[in-house]
Image: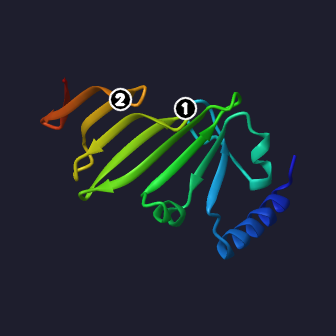
Amino acid sequence: MIGLRAAAALAVLLCAICGTQAAAVEFFTSNRYGIPLTPLLADQAGEAEWLLAIDSAEEAAEAGLVSRRRLSGPEGETREWRISRVDGALQEEELVDGQLIARLAYAASGELEREERYVGGSLSEVDHWLYRQRQPLRMTT
């Protein structure tokens, strides 16, 4: 067990390092749903069964995105979430093994307006979301 002084010294050292050099990508152990669990250093990334990589805002912007998260699984499967701005509103795309499986479009207010699901790269289902007194109502088409 690490002592309180050692933990404080380590925290100060990490803050100093982080303050002078921002990482382009942060790594985390994760689960199959892409939830960040434990932060990892870049050289520890190969140790995780499920590895989540979250791009910095600058790295995402270079790809024309607001944010990007990438998940790698134990059997080589990959999942990616890309958030971008389209006509001033946010749009999120989810890809599995490089293939689009879902696209979510949000209103400027942040409410979900449209949800598209894809099978084999083709659009299979669309849900339009309406709101009554700020309560969501789904209308599938």
- Position of 48 relative to 24 (above/below): above
Q: Amino acid at mark 2?
A: Ser
Quadrant (top left, top right, bottom left, bottom right) of the C terminus: top left
* Residue 93 in the figure: left or right of residue 116: right
- Position of 63 relative to 107 (above/below): below
* Residue 104 in the figure: left or right of residue 121: left
- The location of residue 68, given as percent across then percent down, is 50, 51
Disc with the residue nearer the chain's start (2 vs 1)? 1
Dot 1 falls on a residue whose secondary structure is: loop
- The location of residue 114, given as percent across then percent down, is 24, 37
Residue 122 is labelled as 2
- The location of residue 107, given as percent across then percent down, is 22, 48
- Find disc 1 in the rendering and name its residue: 33
Comparing 77 with 114, the one in front is 77
Residue 89 is labelled as none
Q: Which residue shows up at 32% across the image and 56% down it?
A: 85
Q: Which residue shows up at 68% across the image and 76% down it?
A: 20
Q: Amino acid at mark 1?
A: Tyr
- The location of residue 30, given as percent across then percent down, is 64, 37
Q: Which residue is outermost to the bottom? A: 20
* Residue 70 in the figure: left or right of residue 124: right
Total numbered labels: 2
Q: Which residue is outermost to the left? A: 132
Q: CA distance from mark 2 to mark 1?
A: 23 Å
Q: Are marks 2 and 1 in contact (CB under 8 Å)?
A: no
Dot 2 falls on a residue whose secondary structure is: strand
Comparing 93 with 118, the one in front is 118
* Residue 139 in the figure: left or right of residue 10: left
Q: Which residue shows up at 53% across the image and 47% down it?
A: 69
